[in-house]
Amino acid sequence: WSTLVWSSTITEKNNERNYDYKKMNKYQIEKNREKFDLIKNSLETFGCKVFFENYEITINSSNKNISKIILFLKDNPTTNFDILIDLCAVDYPGRKKRFEIIYNFLSTTQNSRVRLKVNLSDEESIDTISDIYPCANWYEREIFDLFGINFSNHPDLRRILTDYDFEGHPLRKDFPLT
């Protein structure tokens, strides 16, 4: 764990980066370390990889226990990630598991964020979390519409941005452009 946090700005004159180093106080460092250790130790039973990336906790998980992992992140009083900020997908056609689902959570009481990533193949589906975070309903419908990723047990999985008779999924990298 580094005690330095940096942010960069680009000057208009010569496009050079100026780095502004700020020291984190000891309380912030210890708080982040404790939370990281708790999440890492708790999620090892699910086979998750937990690491610190861009000053946020990132969790890589398999598709199997996604609901249990998210319930832990939401209900544990030490983590208390009470808000699902965003749910998105990325298509990597060169990978065996070409899709990556990314959940971004915020804890308003702990003032921290966590990112959860799950990789899926073309044929796999993932469990819905709309029963845990109701706002996930439309996010999951958007991902289904634009990528064709199915969410198991979703209450209303249908297209949300394209017409119902639209063929294909426009954000897939193999979607024909002409």
Image (cartoon, rainbow, N blue to C red):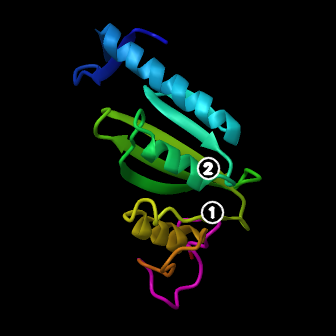
SS for callout 1: strand
| Residue at 73% from the left image edge and 50% from the top image edge | 95
- Would you say 65 lies left or right of 131 here? right
Residue 50 visible (yes or no): no
Residue for badge 2: 118
Q: What is the crowding at mark 2: few (fewer than 14 residues within 10 Å), some, or many (at least 20)?
A: many
On the image, which quarter does residue 44 sit in? top right
In the image, residue 123 above or below residue 51: below
Looking at the picture, how far across and down is residue 73, in whole percent? Answer: 48, 43
Q: Which residue is mark 1?
A: 126
Q: What whole-number distance in Å separates the C-alpha atoms at marks 2 and 1? A: 9 Å
Residue 158 percent location from the top left of the image: 50, 81
> Where, quadrant-wise, is the C terminus in this rendering?
bottom right
Q: Residue furthest right?
A: 96
Q: Which residues are magenta?
A: 161-177
Image coordinates of residue 125 in percent, x first then y, are 66, 66
Q: Nearer the viewer, residue 52 or 170?
A: 52
Residue 98 x/y as whole percent:
69, 55
Q: Is residue 107 left or right of residue 144?
A: left
Tell me, yes or no, whether the highlighted magenta stretch contains residue 166.
Answer: yes
At horizontal 36% and vertical 42% (from top left) the residue drawn is 106
SS class, disc 2: strand
